[in-house]
Amino acid sequence: MNSLVIDLILCGVAYVVLIYFVATLTKSKIKRNRKNNDEDGDGGVEDNTPPVIDLPPGIVWPSDEKDKNPIAF
């Protein structure tokens, strides 16, 4: 056989072995995480408040314009 064919076969075998080990090592982590479905995995405190952004003068948010009267032409 040509040395290129032997190298390709050996690389293919090594790839299959590596994928097998990665699949078996991550399978135990996936099973452990399925026990607690109530956790989203973030690990932090949930804060849903929008950020306060300092806008330049003359620029207003569309939600702030509700109080003003519309301009009539």
Image: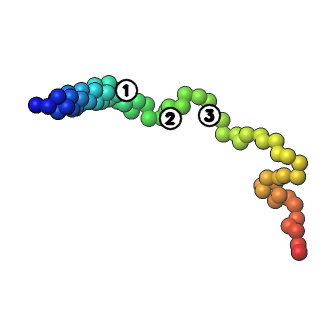
Which amino acid type is marked by label 3? Glu
Check disc 3 and report the residue beneath it. 46
Check disc 2 and report the residue beneath it. 40
Q: Is residue 37 visible?
A: yes
Cα–Cα span, label 3 and label 2: 11 Å
Tell which tag, 3 or 1, sits nearer the viewer: 1
Q: Which mark is residue 29?
A: 1
Quadrant for the N terminus in the image: top left
Image spot of residue 41 (x, y percent)? 50, 31
Quadrant for the C terminus in the image: bottom right
Labels 1 and 2 touching (C-beta < 8 A): no
Q: Quadrant of residue 63?
A: bottom right
Q: Nearer the viewer, residue 68 or 1?
A: 1
Cα–Cα span, label 3 and label 1: 24 Å
Which amino acid type is marked by label 2? Asp
Residue 15 drawn above or below residue 52 = above
Task: Write the residue at 85% across / 46% down.
Answer: 56
Task: Write the residue at 81% across / 59% down.
Answer: 66
On the picture, is 36 further left or further right than 8?
right
Q: Quadrant of residue 29?
A: top left
Image spot of residue 18 (x, y percent)? 28, 26
